[in-house]
Amino acid sequence: MTKFSRRGFLAGTSVVAGAFTFGFSFPLARAQGIAGSEVTAWVVIQPDEAVIIRIARAEMGQGSLTGLAQLVAEELDCDWDKVRFELVKPGENRRRRRVWRDMATGGSRAIRGSQEYLRQGGATARAMLVRAAAEGWGVDPAQLTVAKGVITDAASGRTTTYGAVAAAAMQVAAPATVTLKDPRDWKIAGRPLKRLDTRDKLDGTLVYGVDLKLPGMLVAVPRACPVHGGKLVSFNADAVRAMPGVRHVLKVDDETVAIVADNFWRAKTALDELPVVWDEGPGAKASSATIAAMLKEGLSAETPFVGNRAGDAMAVLAKATKVIEAEYSYPYQNHAPMEVLAATARWTPERCDVWAPTQVAEAALEAVVAASGLAPEACEVNVMRIGGSFGRRLATDYVTMAVRIARQVPGVPVKMMWTREEDMAQGRFHPVTRCRLRASVGADGTIEALHMRIAGQSIGAYARPEAVAKSGDPAVFQGLNQGGAEGAFGYAVPNLLIDFAMRNPHVRPGYWRGVNLNHNAIYVECFIDELAHAAGADPLAFRRKLLAGSPRHLAVFDAVGQGIGWDKPAATGVHRGIAQIMGFGSYVAAAAEVSVTGGKLRIHRIVAATDPGHVVNPQQVEAQIVGSFVYGLSAALHGECTVRDGRIEQQNFDTYEVMRLDEMPVVEVILKPSGGFWGGVGEPTIAVAAPAVLNAVFAARGKRVRDLPLKNISLGTA
Amino acid sequence: MATLNINGKAVTIEGEDDTPLLWAIRDHVGLTGTKYGCGIAQCGACTVHVDGVATRSCVVTVGALGEEQKIVTIEGLGAERPHPVQEAWAELDVAQCGYCQVGMMMASAALLARNPNPSDDEIRAEITNICRCGTYQRVLAGVKLAAARMPNRG
Ligand code: FES
Ligand code: FES
């Protein structure tokens, strides 16, 4: 067997006969299940020096799988070229008393939430391997050094390898404490290494949830009541039973029916023919207009829920000679990951095994236990890599459904797979909100008072109702808080009131990449821009003054100002906008250059800066930041899920349009890790994408866009 | 029942003639590199080559094809040696979740076969596949790198 070699891979020269392997002769499937020595829960070492690093967090494209492995490998001092990964299963984690701890992946927390214990896991394994070598030689471990998995005793000139001592290391007591490296000394972490999980994405062999095949497997395609909260009344199975491939027509739960057939296309074809009667429930009366009215009412309602307060904003505004006021809104968005929802389950009276892409493996296991009626020990979830998720698979609805279907076909593996149309109808939508902002600006160009009233939907009220019923949903103030990782409001405003009126329509909300920071950043950053213009000030200079007491906010903000060349005029016809915010533990800013010609907006260039404290893999962080503009600007330009007769109108990418290559601006990324804290990178930048562009659009046409998406606005003559 | 030529092999599809090529490839032939994203020719995840032309296989039925048309999927594209597009993708670490990337690479390979040296604007106009992870900037760079590496250029 040829040894795995990344350099060979890149040269593209090493091809194994008979199979297209890109020179990798070590397929993951073989890494998994091959015997090795588990030195710590995170590190398994094989006799051929392969180092398998266990990954407990979800990989959905964000690249944290590689970053997590880098953190372990850094402290382990192993040879990065020999590193592979293995995904942890939640049942195994449960059986081993959560040795891999929290498996949830959301809120840009994969790295920042686990870096410390992962580095400790790597350092502990290193200490045990060194001790095993020292004991073998009868020397003091302190005199040994390690480089790339080779242990050296300089005194005697002897060397050995991790592969050679791993079995002995398993018998060595783990050290009580380990000292972690100073990030300044990192050699593997902090470097722009390539992903560990690329090869099977390029030759088509990666098995996503939708691709899984098991012997004797059937495929189920479900349809739930298109109005959320509605019920399944009846369906006429006889009308489709004779159609090709159809095996079962099933009630999945109170609101869902499914066809089980021998393949997806036949199941879908039959489902399209299936007569179904729904009781659509009270939600059926709702429309985008009724939902907007419900939110508007909240803008002036009394509310006790305050997120941030300083001084007495209401009193100052009541006396102010000039109050600037504006109202903004943000529509529903669908996650629309490229891979539709899917999960496979095999249920017998004794056992339930599930194969599922999920962001919350432990919650998925709980869902399997509940839906299967079996004991936790009798259930397992085989965690799969995900074809994009963006928060959608923080919900486990589809896992529950897959088990409920499989339970009705005992012993037969059933892959449940949604259509894109079902994915669009049964999303967990980015919540709708509206915001009314009122402010007065002093003669010195600072903000005297600001009241920001947000009215809208709480994700928590749907996802964690008990907690929110007790103490409200503080997450709605993301980016607007007095302090903390979820977003300190950076501007100095002596009289400030930010409050929230919860108004929950029937449409089910979810955590959509960027979450509440998305709309909050638009509201604040566009309105601050309005205040700057009202004060006759330059939008950059106006903000700089207000950010003087928030050095980290200011540093990324200044970086994009310089990067875009704010102090120099833009090219003829090109206009600029700028925005900053803090959230998910990180400080982010963006500046945009746009033009509007003949009613057509073109986004030419974006400069983005991020301070996430530490950067584990700069080229992956860059990919996250560039991708954030695609996600954020897709929403700003096109994204909108409207409601009519209670159901979401957009059913596919023809009406739920997203950004494509033709609209992609050039994005330049500035990483400014200042150290001392750990912030996330997958989400925060999305929040500045829209306001930077909206402010540039204002600069171009002198008229504000306060409701998204931009496709609804005629950008013709200003 | 239809007989198709997929990756150089004649295969008989035991399904209805109105089965889309995508599902024939995935479920009848068993090659799952070709992806479903929308089913309505919007996203390009299902892109294959039919006689060298990038084709959205979700909207072509097997009944409309014959054995004389040469269908190539990702499994066929790099069967003998990695296609320059695949090499460029690896070198630039283009893929994020990877789900759209097979379609991206198939569309890019077809573009380069037709136009070995496309301009940025041509790439932007021709590659209309959807990537929700937002890899477009590296896709653009990847097509250009692959163009520079294509054998028999010009
Ligand atoms: S699945 Fe064919 S274009 Fe989307
Ligand atoms: S890489 Fe995930 S959709 Fe393109």
Image (tube, rainbow, N blue to C red):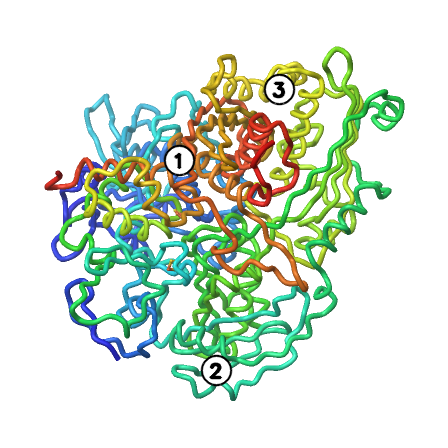
Across and down, in percent, residue B146 comes to 22, 39
Q: Quadrant of residue A397?
A: bottom right
In the picture, measured across the screen, residue B56 lies left or right of residue A624, that is left
Query: Cβ(mark 1) to ligand 2 < 8 Å?
Result: no
The verdict on label 2 being within 8 Å of ligand 1 is: no
The percent position of residue A243, horizontal first and vertical second, equals: 42, 84
Whichever of callouts 2 and 3 sits on the residue coming sooner in the sequence is 2
Residue A642 versus residue A253 in the image, above or below: above
* Nearest to N terminus: mark 3 or mark 1: 3
What residue does disc 1 label? A620
Residue A636 position, x and y percent, is 55, 41
Classify mark 2: helix, strand or loop.
strand
Q: Nearer the viewer, residue A365 or A570?
A: A570
Subunit of mark 3? A
Q: Residues within 10 Å of mark 1 (few under 14, many from 20)?
A: many
| Marker disc for residue A248 | 2
Q: Earlier in the sequence, mark 2 or mark 1?
A: 2
- The disc labelled 2 sits on which kind of residue? His
Give the labeled residue for mark 3.
A539
| Amino acid type of the residue that numbered disc 3 sits on in the rendered structure | Pro
**Chain letter of the residue carrying label 1:** A
